Amino acid sequence: MVELQGARIILRDKIIEDAEQDYIWRSDPELASLDAAFPLTMSYDRFLKLAQDQLRYPTPGSHHFATTTLEGKFIGNCMYYDLDSVNKHAELGIVIGDRDYWSNAYGYDAVTTLLEYCFNEINLTRVYLHTLEWNKRAQRCFEKCGFAQVRPVRRMSHDFILMEVFREDWLPKAEERLAARF
């Protein structure tokens, strides 16, 4: 069981009790559009079964965390996936589903907390992500966390920006970035 504490958030392992709120967020058209996805149309019962299966049989090379406030309120999800253990890199994903926590540095805290774990605990050398070209707010957050834009990428008829951060570039400024969470 992994639990990572930031300044404002805790990243904890997913539990089945998260499924109801995850279903609400994944059914939300605005949140789906931020992930270049369609809102869920499956029943909650079907989604719950999939969530149970994911907890029972996690995808190798990934770790999905619930993002909670320090008080325990579930506000989103953060994860790494597509872990390449040979090249030591992985992709990062995040959603702050609760709009009350947008633009208040909760995303920044979650990303920097996860980067600290990826670079210092699982010894990755590179973390990358894809963000929609038009999502400037997310791009600013990721740049503040240390990511640099690499190039445009076209996937599934959407325009993304590939962003990455290298351990060797992140570590010298890690204390400064982690202190900025408070």
Image: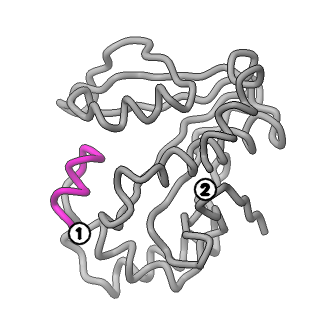
Q: Which residue is mark 1?
A: 27
Residue at 40%, 58% (x, y): give it: 96
Quadrant of the image occupied by residue 36: top left
- 141 in relation to 30, above or below: above
Would you say 107 lies left or right of 45 here?
right
**Boundaries of the magenta span:** 27-37
User: In the structure shown, which secondary structural element does the residue marked by tag 2 occupy?
Assistant: loop
Residue at 36%, 50% (x, y): give it: 103
Would you say 121 lies left or right of 91 here?
right
Nearest the eye: 78 or 62: 78
Q: Residues within 10 Å of mark 1 (few under 14, many from 20)?
A: some
Would you say 163 lies left or right of 41 here?
right
Q: Which residue is mark 2?
A: 59
Where residue 86 sits: x, y (%)? 77, 25
- Residue 35 on the magenta span: yes
Where residue 118 sits: x, y (%)? 72, 39
Q: Residues within 10 Å of mark 2 (few under 14, many from 20)?
A: few
Residue at 55%, 32% (x, y): give it: 145
Where residue 177 sits: x, y (%)? 64, 34
In the rendered image, the residue lying farthest to the top is 151
- 114 in relation to 50, above or below: above
Callout 2 amino acid: Thr
Callout 1 amino acid: Ser
The residues bearing labels 2 and 1 have C-alpha atoms spaced at a distance of 22 Å
Nearest the eye: 54 or 96: 96
